[in-house]
Amino acid sequence: MDRAAPLRSRPTLLSGFDPGFATSLCSGALGRIDFMSNNSARQRFDWTNSLFLASVHLAGIYAIVHLTVFYFSWWTLGFGALWGVFCGLAITGGYHRLFAHTSYSASPLLRAFYLAFGAASVQNSALAWSADHRRHHAKTDSDSDPYDIRRGFWWAHVGWVLHRDVGGKKMDKVNDLHADPLVRFQHRYYIHLAVLFGVGIPAAIGTAWGDPLGTLLVAGFLRLVVQWHATFSVNSLAHMFGRRPYSKLTSARDSFWVALVTFGEGYHNFHHRFQADYRNGVRWFHFDPTKWWVWTMARLGLARNLHRMPADRIAAARQAIQQADHAA
């Protein structure tokens, strides 16, 4: 592991690779896509990001063609789903609830899992993602909110990703994470890990049942498209549709439907009100697989210090909203 060094605004991109257009396209796109968070207002159209997103979407569409027309394999489909679960939990349980909000502590083994599959999710390094996401919570529904829902559904969902930051990424809010050598390692070698876990390993594993191309397409690109849009839905749909039972200070809403496709991230109103809680779905009937995953990891000794907001504080928040609604 590298020793602690001054924070840089972007991971080292493809260091040691031969220069060329393909390398520039890959490094530029992978280094800037951080869908749940970014601190700067985006003013200029970003051709690199746009071309990369379009290419991945086209590859995802071709994955469906490959499965339905050329070679259908239950092994390929099942492995793609499994890889999607791993990558999804790396973002929801790792990048979001562990690194960005430190709502629990995790063993080195679990952190390494999150960092590997988080890179495969192509949403920037955990360090950069967390820096941006912490700023998002501090600036929600303001001009400094990168996917400000006040600018409309399209902007909050994907439009902001298609524009370039006019300012550099601020990394002053993540000194605690920079102290972790695993996080620093992933930040430095993020592109390499994204390629390895995002496409390299899936294609290699697919040779076991004779479908490396299909496994690359399904577990690599189709999985990535589905995961991106699930994440997008938190930024857009969970700020437009649903209830606000805990706070009306922001546009964040609780949405079961968003929770259904994001491993529980849809209980966004509760999360914005009590972001230090490792749970997003706080009630027993809430669909929050990430909460169940973290709880299970704790039972296995891989996680500890699970933060839970006191029940009386949660009840008081709900009661305050109910009283305000009744008075209105």
Image (cartoon, rainbow, N blue to C red):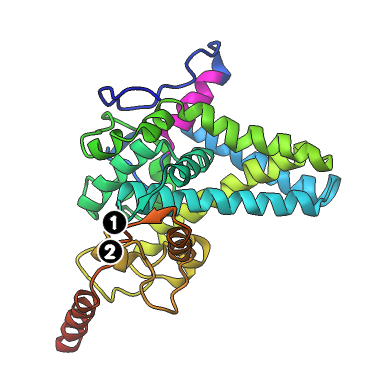
Left or right: residue 80 compared with residue 265: right
Magenta residue check for 26 = yes
> Residue, x 85% and y 45% (percent of image)?
70
Q: Is residue 215 visible?
A: yes
| Residue 315 at x, y percent in the picture | 23, 80
Q: Between marks 2 and 1, how big is the CA–CA gap? A: 9 Å
Amino acid under disc 1? Arg
Give residue 316's mark.
Answer: none
Residue 321 versus residue 183 in the image, above or below: below
Element on which disc 2 rests: loop
| Residue 252 at x, y percent in the picture | 30, 64
Q: Which residue is mark 1?
A: 150
Sequence order check, earlier mark of 2 and 1: 1
> Residue, x 32% and y 43% (percent of image)?
130
Left or right: residue 61 compared with residue 116: right
Which quarter shows the N terminus?
Answer: top left
Element on which disc 1 rests: helix
**Which region shows up in magenta?**
23-33
Q: Dominant secondary structure of the magenta stretch? A: helix
Query: For the residues carrying marks 2 and 1, which lies nearer the camera in this image?
Result: 2
Amino acid under disc 2? Ser
Magenta residue check for 274 = no
Tags 2 and 1 touching, CB below 8 Å: yes
State the residue lying farthest toward the bottom: 326
Q: Which residue is mark 2?
A: 251
> Residue, x 33% and y 49% (percent of image)?
147
